[in-house]
Amino acid sequence: MRTRPIRQVVANAVAVLAVIGIVFGAVTACGSPDQPQEATPIAPDQPGTPGGLNAALGMGANNTLGAAGSAASAIAALGGLGQAQGSAQDVRTLSAQYSTDGQAVLDRFKASVGGILATEPTAEQQATLADLRARSGEQFDQAWLRAAGRFQQQVREAANAVLADEDASDQAKAAAQDALKRLDSTAEELRQASAPAGAATPGAVDAGSGGQAAGDVTPAAIVLVGLGALLLSGALWWRRRAA
């Protein structure tokens, strides 16, 4: 009789498909392939826009003021975004402060060079802002707080670079000192807001193309694992019946 071998072949094939479904579902659940990239801190000589301030003035490659202008512009934009989309009160409060402080620092840096200063955020900062615009609710708040920590550090690094620049004017260095004081006044508020929101915990992603954070289990993965387990159980029962 050929019925029994055919049943065994079919049962084996179903079992293999079930195992593949379970494995694929588990791999999918471990992480999303659409993870955005982390923004990196601004290096002291990284321009805010191509060429930056010194290229416009023909002053060579050193561009500490260009980086400071980009960082201040980015944190001001972050503040405006938080005011518009933030759901938690502490996020909205910090956003208002960042918007005010970022614009004030940017204006002082611009005034120190007669108003000629690169003021666009870097490409990575713009990617972070674009990712935030696609979020809402608690997901937005957590991502915003993580971005705030990075942007704040970037402003600090840019301000310290201006202070260390021998070519920077006294007015520019005064603007950098003001930036550091403003950062110090909001640093503790940011730490307090980040702790209960879980924003200080690494693992979720802040910037990029708007993909899911690593560790999120997608519904498709759950369905694949469940279907695979069901098929495997059916295949084992069929094999015992065919034996």
Image (cartoon, helix red, strand yellow):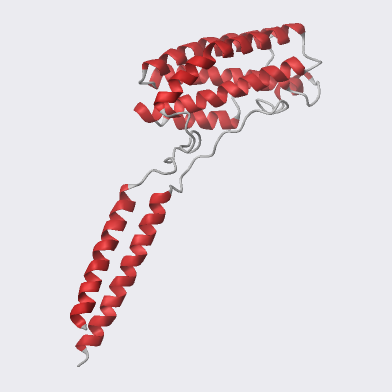
Q: Quadrant of the C terminus?
A: bottom left
Q: Is residue 201 visible?
A: yes
**165 horizontally vs 19: left or right:** right
Looking at the rendering, which quadrant does residue 151 occupy? top right
Place of residue 138 in the rendered image (x, y in percent of width and height, measured from the top left) = 36, 28
Image: 219 above or below 11: above
Q: Quadrant of the N terminus?
A: bottom left
Residue 188 vs residue 68, the one in the foreground: 188
Identify which residue is drawn at 63% across, 19% down. 156
Identify which residue is drawn at 53% across, 24% down. 149
**72 horizontally vs 98: left or right:** right
Image: 210 above or below 126: below
Looking at the rendering, which quadrant does residue 93 occupy? top left
Place of residue 3 in the rendered image (x, y in percent of width and height, measured from the top left) = 20, 87
Identify which residue is drawn at 58% across, 8% down. 104
Residue 186 vs residue 195, the one in the foreground: 195
Q: Residue furthest bottom?
A: 1
Image: 190 above or below 220: above
Q: Is residue 65 visible?
A: no
**216 horizontally vs 179: left or right:** left
